[in-house]
Structures are given as C-alpha cells and as structure tokens.
Amino acid sequence: MKQNGQLKSFRDLKVWQKSVDLAVTVYSVTDRYPKSELYGITSQMRRAAVSISSNIAEGFKRSHQKEKLQFYNVAYASTAELESHVEVSLKLHFPSEDDYQKLIDSVVEIEKMLDGLIKSQSRSTKSYIPYPILFLLFLYSTFYILNPSPVSAAVFSIELSRNSVAPGNELIAELRIDTEGESLNAFEGKLLFPADLLEVKAVRDSGSIATIWLDKPAQIFTDSISFSGITPGGFVGERGRLFEVIFRAKAEGSGLFTIKDARAFRNDGNATLAKSVSTVVPHVTVSGKALPSAIPEMSDVAPPEPFVLTLSKNQDAFEGKRMLIFATQDKQSGIAYYEVCEGLFVSCQREESPYVLKRQSADAFIKVKAYDEFDNVRVAKLSTARSIFRYSLYGILGIIVLAGLLYILVRFARKHFR
C-alpha cells in the first residue's frame, strides 16, 4: 500500500507483481514439458522464475542501498538465465508459439523494469557520496593511472587430499577460487577428471561461497562435473570454496584434473567478465596397495534460509485459482522437501510450489515448513485479512459461549447450594 506517495511494501512494486505472474506462467507452461525434463530444464526454469520475485522482495526489505542493489542484481541475473532457458526450450520444440511469445514478452518487460529499478537505486546511492570522498577517489585514480598495477585475475584451483592413492581408496578434490582482491559474484565451468582411474562417489557443496546454484554441481557425464553459481553481495578472498568431489580409485595409472570453460564475473551489477581467468590443475597417480579409508561424515545443524510466502492468482494458470508460491535455499545439505499447512489444527502435507490452496477463500492461517537433508526445518507463516477476521470471530464466539456456560453454572450453584 502506498502512503504519501511512498512504497510501503514490495507488493506495491509493479516489477514484483509482474515477476510473480511470470513465475506462475512458467509453472503452467513447463507443466506441459516432457516428464523427462522435470529435473532438467523444467526445474531450472521454475527455480529461476521464483528467484526473481524472491530477490526483489528481499532487496526491498534491506535497509542499505548497497544491499538492495545486490539483491536486485541477482533478480536481474535470474531473469537473464530464464530468458536463456526459454530460448533453449524453443529450440527443443517444448513450448507452443503462443506460450513462447507470452514468456519472452514478459521476461523482456521485467528485464527493462529491473534495469530501471537498479539504475534508480544506483543514482540514489551516488547522491549521498560527499565531495571530499569524490576528491579522494580522484586522487587515488590519478595515482593508479600513473602507477599501474597488474590486472587482477580470478584463479580456479583444485586441491587434492593426496596426489597418490591406491586402488579402492578414496580421494577428495576440492574446487576453490582466488579472486586476487577483486569482488566476484558468479562462477561457472566444468571440472574434468580422469574417468579411467577414478569414479565419483559423492559431490558436496556444503560451506560453498555460492549460495544460489543455477547449475548445481553434479556428475552429468562420466568424466566431468559442470557448475554455475552466484554469490549475492560478492566474494573477495584467496581460497573461496565452491564444492568438493569424493572419488574412489578404481584402476592404476596417472592422469590430470582440468577445469574447462572456467569463467568468473565481477560484482559490478553488469555481469562483467573477470579478465584473465586462469586455472591451477593437479596430477594424480593411482598405484600401490589399497588401505582402509572412508568418506568423512557430513553434518548439518543449520536450518534453511528464511523465506517469504506469496499468494497469487492468474487466470492463465490453474483455472484462475489462488496459489501459494514459496522457495528457499540451504547452504549445506540442500532442500529435501516442503510441507504446507492450511489452518491451525490440521496436519501438514508434502507439497511443491506453486501450491493451489484447498481453501480458495484464503481464510485460514498458512504455514510452510522447509526441511533440509538432515531434517533441519525453517518455518514461514502467512496471515491474510480473511484468516485474521475468521479466527478473531471464532475467538469472540468462544468467549461468549464460555461466558454463557459460566453464567449458567453460577445460577445453578446459587439455586441448589444455598
């Protein structure tokens, strides 16, 4: 609701409203995609679509302009990702021409709106820079030009738990990145390993600097693991952890790990490619007698990230019924499933987003539980005006009934126990 011309909620943002409608449309369109793509392009499109509205909402709630820009930029990146997925799905002949046009028109419109929102926030941030700071920046820039330093470069590296391993034993390869003093917020590439010597037993992204995965690291091909992730707010450091792979040595020999198509992007709001991205790759030898070894046990005691529930209604999806949209991330073991509860004293059921409300009147309190792989839980709640009125009415009626019963008991006691 707007008060005195000012936005009081992210729900007042036209771009948020449009992005929620887009998410609903994406779910509706991809529901007709081949079932074999449920965990492929269908999942990626849905995740990207929900990420747009979620990051706009979280950015709006942030108090500092810099934080707002970080989340708006993530929303912008998710929009670009979705646009790419839409084009790929068209090449695969998944959507109809009408569905494709509907999606691409909406995506382009939201991209333009987000671009304007980001630019307006950037101007607001710049307006508060004092002139003395600008003067100091000018002096620093002049010094930098007269005394140029080497161009910084992101360096991907693979750290092995050991370079020599016996057949049957395990080996851990950890992918890290050195930003060399530059703030980076997106990373992608493909980890190649000697498949004739090693086989993958597990891939873990717990503790990763990437909190949003566009392409979560997993073994899709027999000799490689692709990845693409985002770090909202950016990361600066020498040994940023992306993920680790646990291998089992299966045959003797020697080989190299390599990183193909490695790219990193600057945290500048424009997805600028970092210059001179390089890689450091190790050599591994499999030989000798097998020794007992085990995969380190993974532990996770942290719940998933906080998230918001959004009610939506779209005439083009689910017969125009009210639906609930939700999504969150887990930095360690990942999201296992969600449970939805409609009402105070009802059992929760496993559901996915978007969830079509059973009570289309939306007059019940709604609760969603997000569980990670270690059963840690994060709860989000939503109260509508109708649900508050309904339960308030129940409370008043309950008080009246109790007061009536008490009155009857008092009258009965006075009559029979004098």
Image: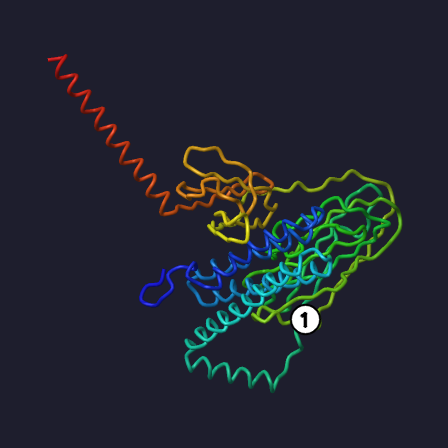
Residue 45: quarter of image? bottom right
Crowding near the residue tagged with mark 1, few <14, some 14–19, many ≥20 C-alpha atoms within 10 Å:
some
Q: Give residue 80's position: percent from left, percent from top.
A: 61, 65
- Does 219 sit above or below residue 404? below
The amino acid type of the residue labelled 1 equals: Ala
Left or right for 94, reference 344: right
Q: Is residue 228 left or right of residue 300?
A: right
Residue sitting at the far left? 418
**In front of the other: 336 or 94:** 94
Residue 120 pos. (x, y %): 46, 73
Q: How is the image coloured?
A: rainbow
Residue at the spot of label 1:
153
Q: Quadrant of the N terminus?
A: bottom left
The secondary structure type at the circle numbered 1 is loop
Q: In this view, does 360 lie to the left or right of 226?
A: left
Question: What residue sits 53% from the left and 36% below the top?
Answer: 349
Given residues 357 and 336, the one toward you in this image is: 357
- Percent across and percent down for residue 46 are 60, 53
x%, y% of residue 247?
77, 47
Q: Is residue 335 left or right of residue 250?
A: left
Name the quadrant containing residue 130. bottom left
